[in-house]
């Protein structure tokens, strides 16, 4: 008879997330973003527990932002010792220090750029990050306060291209309980206690106030909102894809053809769509031609839509590198030379 093995709630949720969302497969190579903090320390331990079962190759990745002086260096030292002690392959990066000042957004871009290079260098299948349910609630609220689309309100995803987040359904409390029971050491980032950063302000000031004065279960409410928005997003994406096939006229705009320079849309069929689908189709067309939506904002799309719906039989609009031409029968979206 096999002995009964007690699994902590965090272990159960982690394993469920792995299987339910198909996050990793047997023989995969997984790059682990390890900061030295409690969340990533738990992530490393949990992946070690399933390493043999899934025949995984684990690689520790750590980036030193050099923004907290010796504290940043101590975090790096901690992770290096961890990798050495556990005999796990590792890769480290650091910012060439210009100043201690670095915005949240800039730091994220630099860190993800490092992770992207590390993925390629190590030929890893996935990058595992330690975002948890509390992080998800903060993200959804932050997106809402800034003014977000359905995609923004859906928050972070368990799997997004090569990024996986197995702890997204796990609370901070569950993570800390696991670390305590397992006697796993970790470090605390002092900058997480400073409310000058937007996320910290939401976590330390705004969410506690909402819990006290309005909704004690606000975190669960935000997580449920994210789930509902994700379902809605999936449905609308299916509808958008159907509409795209109906209105696109040029055959070279396909996922396989990455050199397409223009998208030609049938004007009469486009006009018959509801406004939401029209805006989504315009975004898809620009994305396929420009390869990204950088510096394309909602007001740009609304301006284009206004021209398309106008009585003018021929009209033209330029937005940066993109040119939109309305003719009698078509809408042509192309790249400016």
Image (cartoon, helix red, strand yellow):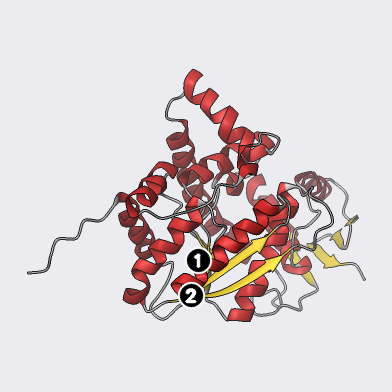
Q: CA distance from mark 2 to mark 1?
A: 8 Å
Residue drawn at x 64%, y 68% is 115
Instruction: Name the residue nearer the viewer: 203 or 181.
Output: 181
Residue 280 visible in the current orientation: no
Q: Residues within 10 Å of mark 2 (few under 14, many from 20)?
A: some
Residue lying furthest left in this view?
Answer: 1
Q: Quadrant where the C terminus lies? A: bottom right
Q: Is residue 122 above or below residue 159?
A: below
Instruction: Name the residue nearer the viewer: 276 or 8.
Output: 8
| Residue 159 on image: x %, y % | 50, 62
Residue lying furthest right in this view?
Answer: 337
- Taking the image as shown, residue 172 lies to the left or right of residue 287, namely left
- Taking the image as shown, residue 296 lies to the left or right of residue 39, namely right
Disc nearer the start of the sequence (2/1):
1
Q: Residues within 10 Å of mark 1 (few under 14, many from 20)?
A: some
| Residue 71 on image: x %, y % | 65, 51
Residue drawn at x 46%, y 44% is 228
Mark 2 falls on what kind of element?
loop
Residue drawn at x 72%, y 73% is 250
Q: Which mark is residue 218?
A: none
Mark 1 falls on what kind of element?
helix
Disc 2 and disc 1 in contact, CB within 8 angstroms:
yes
Badge 1 is on which residue?
82
| Residue 198 on image: x %, y % | 67, 38
Badge 2 is on which residue?
88
Q: Is residue 113 above or below residue 121?
A: above
């Amino acid at each position: 008879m096999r002995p009964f093995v007690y699994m902590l709630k965090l272990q159960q949720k982690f394993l469920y997330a792995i299987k339910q969302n198909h996050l990793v497969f047997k023989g995969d190579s997984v790059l682990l973003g390890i900061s030295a903090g409690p969340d990533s320390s738990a992530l490393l331990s949990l992946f070690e527990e399933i390493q043999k079962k899934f025949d995984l190759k684990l690689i520790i990745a750590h980036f030193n932002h050099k923004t907290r002086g010796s504290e940043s260096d101590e975090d790096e030292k901690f992770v290096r010792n961890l990798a050495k002690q556990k005999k796990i392959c590792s890769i480290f990066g650091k910012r060439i220090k210009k100043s201690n000042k670095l915005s949240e957004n800039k730091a994220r871009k630099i860190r993800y750029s490092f992770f992207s290079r590390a993925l390629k260098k190590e030929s890893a299948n996935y990058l595992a990050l330690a975002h948890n349910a509390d992080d998800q609630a903060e993200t959804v609220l932050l997106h809402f306060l800034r003014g977000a689309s359905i995609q923004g309100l859906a928050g972070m995803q368990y799997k997004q291209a090569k990024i996986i987040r197995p702890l997204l359904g796990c609370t901070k409390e569950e993570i800390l309980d696991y670390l305590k029971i397992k006697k796993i050491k970790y470090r605390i980032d002092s900058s997480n206690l400073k409310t000058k950063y937007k996320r910290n302000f939401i976590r330390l000031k705004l969410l506690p106030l909402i819990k006290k004065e309005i909704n004690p279960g606000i975190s669960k409410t935000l997580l449920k909102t994210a789930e509902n928005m994700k379902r809605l997003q999936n449905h609308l994406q299916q509808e958008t894809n159907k509409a795209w096939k109906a209105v696109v006229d040029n055959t070279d705009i396909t996922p396989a053809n990455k050199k397409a320079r223009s998208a030609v849309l049938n004007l009469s069929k486009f006009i018959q769509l509801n406004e939401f689908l029209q805006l989504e189709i315009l975004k898809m067309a620009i994305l396929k031609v420009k390869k990204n939506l950088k510096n394309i904002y909602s007001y740009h799309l609304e301006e284009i839509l206004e021209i398309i719906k106008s009585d003018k039989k021929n009209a033209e609009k330029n937005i940066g590198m993109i040119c939109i031409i309305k003719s009698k029968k078509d809408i042509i979206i192309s790249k400016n030379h």
